[in-house]
Amino acid sequence: MTVPHAQRQQMSNSSFITQFLLLAFTDTRELQLLHFWLFLGIYLAALLGNGLIFTTVAYDQRLHTPMYFFLLNLSLLDLGSISTTLPKSMANSLWDTRAISYAGCVAQVFFFLFLIVGEYFLLTVMAYDRYVAICKPLHYGTLLGSRACVHMAAAAWGSGFLTALLHTANTFSLPLCQGNAMEQFCEIPHLLKLSCSDAYLREVGLLAFSAFLFWGCFVFIVLSYMQIFRAVLRIPSEQGRHKAFSTCLPHLAVVSLFISTSIFAYLKPPSISSPSLDLVMAVVYSVVPPTLNPFIYSIRNQELKDALRKLMTGCFSAAIDCLLSSAKGSQCMS
C-alpha cells in the first residue's frame, strides 16, 4: 500500500518536532499565578510528607521491618513521580508559556511511567506483605526475610523501568503528523492521538498487555485482602483486630486511591470526556496519591507517629543545643 505524498511529507516533518505545547489550565494571568501557588503548596506538602516518612524509617531502628522498608520505597516513588510533572507545570504557569521540549517530553513520559508502574507493583508486594503478616504470621520471617524484601522491591523498580523503556521507545518511534498540542502532561494516550501511522497499533497492543498485568495485580490484591479480612474477623480479641486493621487499612486506602483515580482517568466513558475534565483527572491521579499517601499512612500508624515525634524532638533538641553552643562561642557538633 502506497502512502500519499502529502502524508509522507507530514510524516517526514514529524522528525523535525522540537517541542510540544501543553494545554494550559487558563489563559487568565491571575488564575495562572493562582495555579502556580496552589501547585507549589501541594508540591511542598508532598515533599515534606514523603521526606519525613523516608527520613523517619531510615533513622529509627525499630522501623527496620519489611512493612516499613516497602513504605520507604513507596515514599521514594511518590517523590519521584510528583517531581516529574508538577515542576514543569508550575514553571509554565509562572512564565506564561505552554512549551515543553521534545527531549523533555520523552523524559517526562519515561520517568512518570517508570515511577507509576513501579509504585503499582510495589503496592501489590505490600499487599502480599500484609497477607503473610496476618494470615501466615509464623512464616513471616521466612517468607519476608531481608533478602526477599530487597528482591521484591528491586523487582517492582525493575518492572517499572522495563515497562517505561518499552512504551517510551515504541511511542516516540511513531511518526507524528497531527500537530504538537496535548494535555497538561506528556502522556502516551495523548501522543498516540498525534500519530498518523497504523504503527500505533503496536503501542495499543503493548497497552493491552500492560492492562492485562494491571488487572492481574488488581485481582491478586483483592484476593489477598479477602483472605486478610477473613483472618482478622477470626481474631478473638478486639484489640488484636484493631491492631491488624490499623496496619491494613492505610495500605488499602492508598491502593483504592491510586486505582480509582487511574481507572477514571483512562477508562471513563467517552460521553463524559472533555478537555477540561481530562485535564482535571490528569492532575488528580498524578498529584493526589503522592500527596495524600504520607498522611494516610501516618494517621492510624502509632509506631510511625511515635518515631516521627522522636525524630522531631531530637532535631529540635539538637537545634537548641547548637544555638546555645553558638551563643557561648563554640562550634555546633553534628
Image (spheres, rainbow, N blue to C red):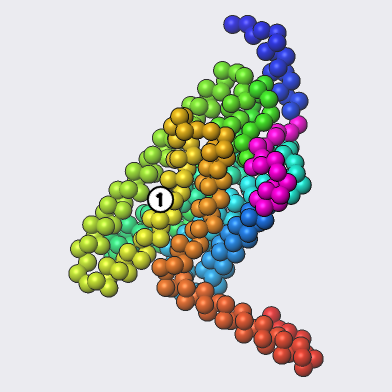
> Residue 172, how many percent across, how many down?
64, 30
In the image, is 158 to the left or to the right of 142?
right
Provide the residue span drawn in magenta.
Answer: 18-35
Query: What is the quadrant of the N terminus in the image?
Result: top right
> Residue 104, how many percent across, how many down?
70, 40
| Above or below, 86 relative to 176 | below
> Residue 195, how many percent across, how many down?
61, 23
Q: Quadrant location of residue 282? A: top right
Q: Is residue 12 magenta?
A: no
| Above or below, 320 relative to 86 | below
> Residue 247, how many percent across, how many down?
37, 64
Q: Quadrant location of residue 65? A: bottom left
Q: Quadrant location of residue 240? A: bottom left
In this view of the protein, which residue sits in the foreground, 174 or 22? 22
Q: Is residue 28 magenta?
A: yes
Q: Which residue is mark 1?
A: 256
